[in-house]
Image: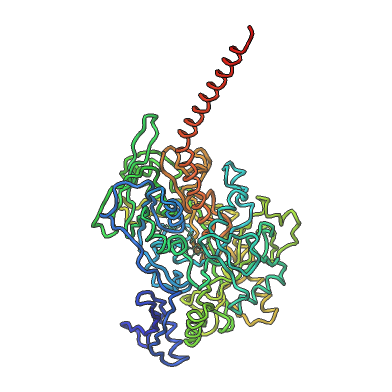
Amino acid sequence: MSIILEPIWRDGFKLGGDYRIRINGSIYLPVKATVSLGLDAGCGTLNQQTISLPPKCGLSAAHRQFSVNKLDSEYDYVVLGGGNAGCVLARRLSEGGKHTVLLVEKGDAGDSAPLPSLHFWSDGKHSTVFDSAVDPKFGRSFSLISGLGLGGTTRINGGQYTLGVPAEYNAWSEEGRPGWSYEELKPYFTKSETWVGPVPEEWHGSTGPLTVRSYEDFYFGCSKEAAKAATDLGFSSILDMHSPLEPSIGWNKMQYTLGTDGTRQSSFRAYLPKTFVNSTQNLHICTRAVGSKLAFSRQTDGRLRTDSVKIQSTDGRHVRVVKARQEVILACGAFETPKLLLLSGVGPEEHLDQMGIEVVRHTPGVGANLQDHIYIKTVYNCPLPDSLWAIVRRPWILIREIYNYLILGFGWLLCTQIEVEIFGMASLIDAEGKPTAASAEHKDPFNPNNRPDFAVLATPIADPREPGIDWSKGLFGPNCALMKAESRGRVLLRSRNPLENPLCEMGYLTHPKDWAALRAALRVSSQLCRQMRANGYALEESKVPRALDDETLDAFIKERVETMYHYASSCRMASEVDAHPGVVDPELRVHGISNLRISDASVLPSAPAVHPQALIYAVAEKCADMMLKGYEIFHLLPVIFIFDARMFLLNITTELGRYLIRRINSPY
Ligand SMILES: Cc1cc2nc3c(=O)[nH]c(=O)nc-3n(C[C@H](O)[C@H](O)[C@H](O)COP(=O)(O)OP(=O)(O)OC[C@H]3O[C@@H](n4cnc5c(N)ncnc54)[C@H](O)[C@@H]3O)c2cc1C
């Protein structure tokens, strides 16, 4: 295996060259034109460098796979979507060898190192990127991104791993979802995780497939300064954000899904290693194919049953219909799962009529209630060596970090952008952005009123493409995030072509609470940077609001709001008669249709104040567990019945015998 740093020559690019990193011949970390200006101006020309990768960093070698035309005609379980949730389900349903399982994934197989495979640093080949519908409020659309290939979005995400406060899940349970309280969900978080430190492991899992870790210190000077300033401002320092005893307001050092050997822990790498896949004959994985339509039959009781799935290769060359003896599980993500239901005739009838699709079942919740976290990026210049941007500006730092990564297994290539996160509640932030003194009641993480609604993500880099930024210096970008959205959008079909992206109306900022939370985040970010400067840190404003009054902040928000890529709740777990109608019940079964479940970000009742991947792992673990337990109970019933019937006969016979003996022995 090799890493090559090589120049790229493009038409029209006159001032030297772009560079790119080629890992193992196929994965690139492009160093953009602006960057190469820096390389040329500051550091002279760089020649090709080749560095060997030790096997621990190897990309996954061939997993056993099946093309569409080689699939069996029937499986016990068919899982559509091999992403965050899909890989967990494929693993749990197939291990033990009792059930045949088919996993269908639109993209390919493979994996890479943490930073170069993060969407923003990658070649984009493992991302689906498309524009949302234009929002008249903002006069523009939003660029939506999700993962493509086994591992799904965990293959290109930032790796931040957060559970959230217990209040999040207790609220779900109190609203009428049995089984979804913090206490009931926690075992599934633990089941998926192996924590490798450095904080105490009391609240973590130790035997799960997914490795989660943090670092002793900070990699970036600006993160360290931000953490210090947050403490100075009065935000509590949270040692382990996974402890249910920590308050809902504070700052923490991020934890990541990272292997001990520095590998990205996608759900694919964690749950479906080659050793498992190649030795599990009852698991078939089919990549570069999509589930394009579900077929249903009507049972004698009038209920719909999911019978089969139409699967087609993404090149359009092969189509096959596969039957599911037990269940079909949709895990295509918050955009594609509702799209597949709509294509199959399950959704709001007006929209299906509009698209010329026969209505199988009028289900108004499909695609409705789409939620997301959004953020506003602010930009500051900081000393270059303190910022991840230095890896692009200074080739020797890049070489140093490649060395650190390959030989020592640590360094900047492990960092996936955010080291420090402040979270809080807008109601507890004053007009200057300082936290107000919170009572013990406000800090109680079990109280549903204490769910954080904003976060400030201190990022050791900013988007260098922004006009007007001084990219010769370091970049520090506190991103101000809405973490508890009240606004809702919806997912619709653009066409009946299963390979076309859906039409997503994001519906951002239609609720006044969302504006208030973002304003609070911007004020905290501004105060944080003021404090960093007061502590003697060289920070210069680049893209920040001119003032902190509501009007100025709102204009800044309107101009700069972006998705944070945490799409959720488009097939939410709720009753169908809810004000925001649901699609699945607490067992994740689609209302009114048997043998069909959903297990991905679309089922979340609402987008909780967390980076969602930890929760999606837990949801998938819980879904698999419910399915397997349901299967066992169903199949044990006749045994219990036979056993009971035998015991009954035995008891009767014994009692009859005793009675006869008593009669015979009786003198009367
Ligand atoms: C750039 C970026 C950074 C992020 N950073 C973080 C982070 O740091 N921490 C965090 O917690 N979260 C992060 N997220 C969000 C998080 O990763 C996702 O919310 C979560 O992984 C979604 O999981 P999922 O199972 O619902 O969907 P996905 O993981 O997206 O899986 C869906 C899969 O289904 C496949 N598919 C779609 N349609 C079909 C079909 N018809 N047939 C077959 N296959 C299909 C897709 O190719 C995909 O692989 C980030 C997201 C992005 C985009």
Q: Residue at x 62, y 43 (%)?
A: 174
Seen in the picture, residue 372 relative to 45 is either above or below; the reply is: above
- On the image, the x and y values in percent for residue 71 come to 29, 53
Which of the four quarters of the rendered structure image does ligand 1 lie in? bottom left
Q: Residue 616 vs residue 449: left or right?
A: left
Q: Quadrant of residue 358?
A: top left
In this orientation, does residue 360 appear? yes
Seen in the picture, residue 351 relative to 519 is either above or below; the reply is: above
Seen in the picture, residue 295 relative to 55 is either above or below; the reply is: above
Q: Nearer the viewer, residue 79 or 422?
A: 79
Q: Residue furthest left?
A: 317
- On the image, the x and y values in percent for residue 130 come to 39, 62
Q: Residue at x 52, y 28 (%)?
A: 647
Q: Quadrant of the N terminus?
A: bottom left
Q: Residue 551 vs residue 282: left or right?
A: right
- On the image, the x and y values in percent for residue 7 come to 37, 85
Q: How many marks?
A: 0
Q: Quadrant of residue 194?
A: bottom right
- On the image, the x and y values in percent for residue 604 come to 52, 50
Q: Nearer the viewer, residue 248 or 645?
A: 645
Q: Nearer the viewer, residue 606 or 603?
A: 603
Q: Nearer the viewer, residue 390 or 240?
A: 240
